[in-house]
Structures are given as structure tokens and as C-alpha cells.
Image: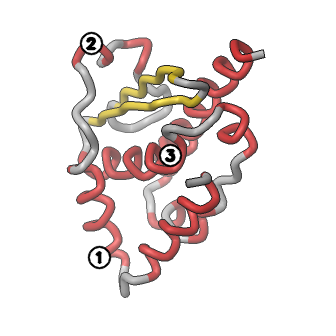
Amino acid sequence: MTIKEIQEEIIDEFSMFDDWMERYEYIIELGKSLPIINDDFKLEENLIKGCQSKVWLYSELENDTIKYTADSDAILTKGIVALLLRVFSEQKPKDILAAETGFIDDIGLKEHLSPTRANGLTSMIKQIKMYAIAYQTQLK
């Protein structure tokens, strides 16, 4: 699936919920389904700066696509990162770099987060794209 198709799928899923409590519960469930990150990757250099809670993000280039793994010590944040990995993991660096993130506004996520969590979300996206930049230069 393309990044755009995954984003549209997420928008459709979120449109099924009537209120934000149901959406928060869904995000938390997504976090619970996030594969466990290898403890070897829970290093200081994999911590995302700018997040209120601890978020570790690790990436590897496999067959010209980036595979991201992540974890957080906060359940809602873990769900948010699970949502981002669903969109960006297993994608080509150039596609990640070209991707818009308007789906976040379309589902109303940013407006329903505290300012510090919204900053953390921005930091997560920025780090995902920084990895893509690094891998894109390796592929040239």
C-alpha cells in the first residue's frame, strides 16, 4: 500500500467514532498492538528529543525500504507512534520524504492533544523524516 492509501484508510477508521474518548481508546489499542522493540534499541541515541514521555525510534533499511520500530513509556504516546509507523514503516525513503502528514489534521489528532504531546508528535514525524533523509543519501 502507498502512504496515501494507508492515510486514507486511517481517516476512514477514525470517522467511524462518534467522539474523542472512543478515538483515544482506539489509539491506546493501537499502542498495545505495537510489536515489542528490542531492548538493545532502547538507547539514548534512539530517544526522540522534544517528547514529554520517552519515545525510542529505531530504523533499518531493508530492500530499499525503511523498517521502523518504536516504543514509549506512555500508553497514548505509544498509540500515536504506532499510527505513524503504520503509515511510514516499510516505505521507500523518497516516498516518506514526499509524504504529506495532513491526515493527522483530518482525523483531528493534533487539536485534541496537549501542547507538549502535539510538540512530541511533530518531533516524531521529524525524526522519521530525518532517518529517511539519511537512508536516501545512502541509496544514491
Q: Secondary structure at mark 2?
A: helix
Look at mark 3 in the image and give the residue it sits on: 121
Residue type at mark 2 is: Asp
Quadrant of the image for the N terminus? bottom right
Residue 64 coordinates in the image, percent (x, y) = 61, 26
Quadrant of the image for the C terminus? top right
Residue 45 coordinates in the image, percent (x, y) = 43, 12
Look at mark 2 in the image and give the residue it sits on: 40
Q: Earlier in the sequence, mark 3 or mark 1?
A: 1
Look at mark 1 in the image and give the residue it sits on: 22
110 lies left or right of 16 = right
- Residue drawn at x 57%, y 30% is 65
Residue type at mark 3 is: Leu
Q: Quadrant of residue 128?
A: top right
Residue type at mark 1 is: Glu
Residue 120 coordinates in the image, percent (x, y) = 48, 41
| Colouring style | secondary structure
